[in-house]
Amino acid sequence: MLEAKDILTDNSLDRSKKIAKLQDLLSEARGLQRAATEGGMDSDDGFTRNLRDIELALEKLNADMPETGAATL
């Protein structure tokens, strides 16, 4: 699975493409976390860590950050 650090270190991507890929990854990670929450799956399966890693990567690129919180899941 592609991770935030892989996108940040990919020198073939410019800043805007990195941001777009990270935003896609963020959307996917939120969907997985939402499914885990609604489906009663183990809440300590790494989704929260992955979300935070992606958000930190976006911050590092000075990207516009989407709103976060329980309502955005």
Image (spheres, rainbow, N blue to C red):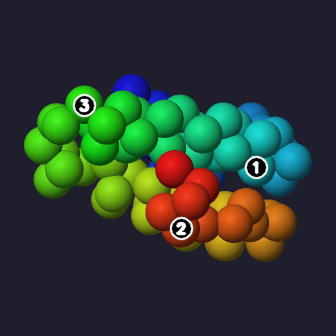
Q: Position of 55 compared to 17: left or right? A: left
- Give percent across and percent down for residue 40: 18, 37
Q: Which of 4 and 44 is in front in this view?
A: 44
Mark 3 or mark 2, which has the lower sequence index? 3
Q: Position of residue 32 (x, y in %)?
A: 40, 34
Q: Determine the secondary structure under disc 3.
A: helix
Q: Looking at the rendering, in which quadrant would you find the N terminus?
A: top left
Q: What amino acid is found at the position of numbered circle 1 in the picture?
A: Ile
The residue under label 2 is: 69
Residue 11 in which image quadrant: top right
**Which residue is pictured at 69% across the width and 66% down the height?**
67
Residue lying at 67% horizontally and 72% vertically, measured from the top left: 59
Q: In the figure, is residue 33 to the left or right of 2?
A: left
Is 56 drawn above or below residue 1 in the view shown? below
Neighbours of disc 1 within 10 Å: few (<14), some (14-19), many (20+) = many
Which image quadrant for residue 35?
top left
**Foreground of the two, 2 or 10:** 2
- Please name the residue that numbered disc 1 is placed on: 19
Disc 3 designates what residue?
39
Cα–Cα span, label 3 and label 2: 19 Å
Res 5 visible: yes
Tell me the distance, in whole angstroms, between the alpha carbons under discs 2 and 1.
20 Å
Sequence-wise first label, 3 or 1: 1
Residue at left offset 48%, top offset 35%: 31
